[in-house]
Amino acid sequence: MSQLSNDTPTACLALADGTIFYGQGFGATGTAVAELCFNTAMTGYQEIMTDPSYAGQIVTFTFPHIGNVGVNPDDDETGDPVAEGMVVKWMPTQSSNWRATQELGEWLSARGRIAIGGVDTRRLTRAIRQQGAPHVALEHNPEGKFDLEALVEKARAFPGLEGLDLAKDVTCAQSYRWDEMRWAWPDGYARQTDPKHKVVAIDYGAKRNILRCLASAGCDVTVLPATATAEDVLSHSPDGVFLSNGPGDPAATGKYAVPMIQQILNETDLPMFGICLGHQMLALALGAKTVKMNHGHHGANHPVKEIETGKVEITSMNHGFAVDSQTLPTGVLETHVSLFDGSNCGIRMEDRPVFSVQQHPEASPGPQDSFYLFERFAASMDREKASSA
């Protein structure tokens, strides 16, 4: 089906303010309760649904043609979808792509994720922009029977993402090694066989393609859980430390992550690089603060300016919290800003090889505008080794 249906609704989206959106359900049946955000990307819906940063959220896709290229195992950013559900304008059509191995609806159903199609996503997006990211309840019932009052109450009872540490829910259970590099034609994913640097990556909800980019930059990557201590990190004798993306309130995750980062900064001169939640963790460790955004940044068309060079990058973003640049301490420089709203998108220590960015350089929106950040991290490890020698 590629247009709005006149059939009896089989899914319903209830906002905490009592607004109801009806549509046709696909994927799994049942109810999901979460924060609702919108994403403006025209491609990458599978990447978005499997990005651990979307834990606790239902995603409204502003682009109407979702599902038309199907799904395939290579595009998963983690083992299963992490976003709680999806909202789309048009029901997915039969997939048409040489890489597709499964239909979107079948994939969602097998993984317990609910979706609703036939929704006026423009109206919904305007509501999110004007009122902030709402709490919602999404139900898929093939019989079309809904207890609307109960759904609204579930939406109102959702505690929200502020104060929630979701990194513990999506991090790895134990450490592991990673050597798979970025996809390249015609061989696909090759293995890093001649790494130059040992990197410990802290997994707050790491996307696989970030790890691939590190491997492609010459790194032998060991991934540790979000709760790893400084002793755990240093036991691997790394040349650098990477702080990954992830979901939830950075202040909540920071209760255990910040002391670890501060200890490494105090006891070593190791280069450090953070992305997304890792950027926020580093900022908190350096003494800055984070704030909840009205509706966040979610999309693949976000212009970000690197202040020192004036270069503008087209970036991919997914965050509902931001670093408050007004709270950056002396010795910590703002390096990148959003050209949409001026919010902070990057920092670095003035006298040390420690830096981070809010955007996702691995997501290829530019498509290669931000890959230099991984090369910069590798170069900083080269310099530290040379100076130590």
Image (cartoon, helix red, strand yellow):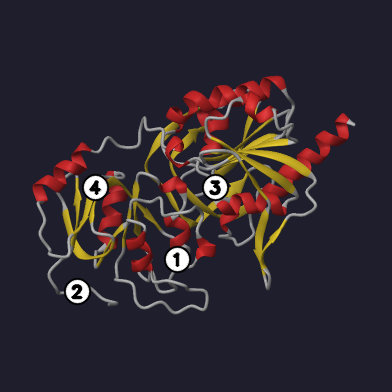
Whether residue 372 is visible to the viewer of this picture, yes or no, is no
Residue 128 appears left or right of 71: left
Q: Which mark is residue 136?
A: 4
Earlier sequence position, callout 2 versus callout 4: 2
Label 3 neighbour load within 10 Å: few <14, some 14-19, many 20+: many
Horizontally, residue 46 falls left or right of residue 389, namely left
Label 4 or label 1, whichever comes before in sequence order: 1
Q: What is the CA distance from the residue labelled 1 to the residue labelled 2?
A: 23 Å
* Amino acid type at mark 4: Val
Residue 137 % position (x, y) = 22, 49
Task: Tell me whether the residue at label 2 lies in contact with that at label 4, contact meaning CB atoms closer than 8 angstroms.
Answer: no
Residue highlighted by disc 1? 42
State how far apart marks 3 and 2 are (Cα).
Answer: 37 Å
Q: Position of residue 312 (x, y in %)?
A: 61, 53
Tell me which label, 1 or 2, sits earlier in the chain. 2
User: Is the residue 47 above or below the residue 169 in the image?
Assistant: below
The residue sitting at 48% across, 53% down in the picture is 79
- Crowding at dot 2, Cα within 10 Å, few <14 / some 14-19 / many 20+, comes out as some
Amino acid type at mark 3: Gln
Residue type indicated by callout 2? Ser
Q: Earlier in the sequence, mark 4 or mark 3?
A: 4
Disc 4 to disc 3: CB gap under 8 Å: no
Please tell me which residue lies in front, 227 or 257: 227
Is disc 3 placed on a helix, strand or loop? loop
Q: Position of residue 155 (x, y in %)?
A: 20, 43
**Residue 5 tag number:** 2
Query: What residue does disc 3 label?
Result: 359
